């Protein structure tokens, strides 16, 4: 993109952000408020950053939020702050990369609330900033971002409470995980075509792609194999999250009325958080906005298997 093109894109983005800021100030009409103070939303990795903001904004709308964090002290401190603002927020420890932690959280929520209505899979890691592209922590990145998210979805499908408003699962993902990103994509055309076709997409295909990448990392051959060029391990993990979102949307599509589960993913933009080393061009509050908007969509606007950014659908 030339200099003029970049400036036009920047101006369009700024205009869109202004529009969103206006939309955020509009209160929900009472017919669109499908939730109550008994509606339970769980947010993972919510002690800081975008997750904290998603938890806060959902609670501001009057739902009951379970703020989870892998570190109990950090999680409790976050909850204390939100309770100080009068919000209905409760802390529970949850490390999405540890099966025992997920299992004990599942038991707790089943006993206390009989399940949940909204699940926000936000927990994530990325060990690169700036122009770095190390794969030293690739296993941890894939284990947290992809397998952690997948573990949560698999277990929590049976925990989503039946309702006519539909249960909602939202995966916090990234544009870096686009199959066909302009500057950041899988180079293998055959694989890319398979990943784009719903008929070819399977759990095995996604897991094999991820396993193949990790195997090449171990062998030291990943760099010559045409993986996304920016933050490669992170991009592969978010690509897998996006693909899994599409796959699960298809699998969940036939559930009967009253038992529907809607699953989507979104990119919060480039956000000033610890993950980006406080670089980025938007605040955590703005980055959380589209996530909260999707989680609370009025029933007549509900959609599934889609990818969003800045309150709009974008392509995978
Ligand atoms: N910032 C961006 O520009 C950007 C862009 C696109 C997508 N995202 C996505 O947005 C989400 C939030 O990122 P952020 O920018 O807010 O980063 P952040 O400030 O680093 O927050 C990440 C959160 O995830 C938690 N976490 C990490 N591993 C976990 C695990 N195994 N179990 C439970 N929680 C875990 C962290 O806990 P600790 O505090 O204990 O480390 C922290 O609370 C991530 O999924 C990220 O990939 C961010």
Image (spheres, rainbow, N blue to C red):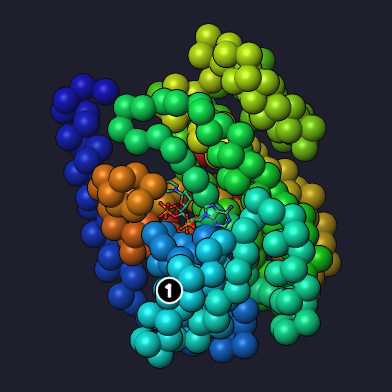
Splitting the image into 4 quarters, where does residue 167 fall?
Answer: bottom right
Residue shown at 79%/32% (left/top)?
Answer: 204
- For the N terminus, which image quadrant? top left
Drawn side of residue 73 relative to residue 200, left or right: left
Drawn side of residue 219 relative to residue 315, left or right: right
Drawn side of residue 157 relative to residue 81, left or right: right
- For the C terminus, which image quadrant? top right
Vertical comparison of 126 with 84: above or below: above
One can see residue 16 in this view:
no
> Which is nearer the eye, 278 or 184?
278
Q: Is mark 1 within 8 Å of ligand 1?
A: no
Label 1 secondary element = helix
Vertical comparison of 161 with 13: above or below: below
Vertical comparison of 85 with 264: above or below: below
**x, y (%) of residue 102?**
71, 61
**x, y (%) of residue 266?**
50, 51
**x, y (%) of residue 77?**
43, 75
Drawn side of residue 202 relative to residue 29, left or right: right
Residue shown at 75%/68% (left/top)?
Answer: 104
Splitting the image into 4 quarters, where does residue 240 fall?
Answer: top right
Task: Name the residue that disc number 1 marks.
Answer: 78
Vertical comparison of 28 with 245: above or below: below
One can see residue 71 in this view:
yes
**x, y (%) of residue 311?**
42, 57
């Amino acid at each position: 993109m030339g200099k003029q093109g970049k400036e036009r894109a920047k101006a369009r983005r700024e205009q869109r952000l202004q529009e969103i800021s206006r939309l955020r100030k509009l209160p929900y009409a009472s017919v669109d408020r499908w939730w109550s103070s008994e509606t339970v939303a769980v947010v993972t990795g919510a002690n800081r950053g975008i997750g904290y903001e998603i938890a806060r904004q959902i609670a501001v709308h009057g739902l009951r939020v379970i703020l989870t964090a892998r570190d109990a002290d950090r999680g409790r401190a976050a909850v204390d702050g939100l309770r100080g603002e009068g919000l209905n927020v409760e802390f529970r420890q949850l490390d999405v990369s540890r099966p025992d932690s997920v299992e004990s959280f599942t038991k707790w929520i089943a006993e206390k609330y009989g399940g949940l209505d909204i699940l926000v899979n936000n927990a994530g890691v990325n060990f690169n900033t700036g122009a770095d592209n190390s794969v030293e922590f690739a296993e941890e990145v894939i284990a947290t971002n992809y397998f952690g998210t997948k573990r949560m979805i698999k277990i929590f499908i049976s925990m989503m409470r039946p309702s006519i408003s539909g249960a909602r699962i939202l995966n916090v993902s990234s544009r870096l995980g686009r199959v066909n990103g302009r500057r950041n994509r899988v180079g293998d055309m055959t694989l890319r075509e398979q990943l784009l076709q719903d008929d070819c997409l399977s759990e095995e295909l996604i897991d094999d792609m991820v396993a193949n990448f990790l195997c090449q990392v171990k062998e030291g051959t990943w760099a010559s194999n045409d993986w996304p060029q920016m933050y490669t391990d992170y991009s592969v993990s978010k690509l897998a999250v996006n693909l899994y979102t599409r796959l699960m949307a298809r699998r969940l599509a036939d559930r009967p009325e009253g038992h529907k589960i809607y699953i989507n993913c979104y990119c919060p933009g480039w956000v000033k958080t610890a993950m980006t080393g406080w670089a980025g061009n938007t605040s955590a509050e703005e980055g959380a906005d589209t996530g909260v908007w999707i989680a609370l969509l009025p029933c007549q606007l509900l959609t599934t298997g889609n990818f969003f950014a800045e309150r709009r659908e974008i392509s995978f």
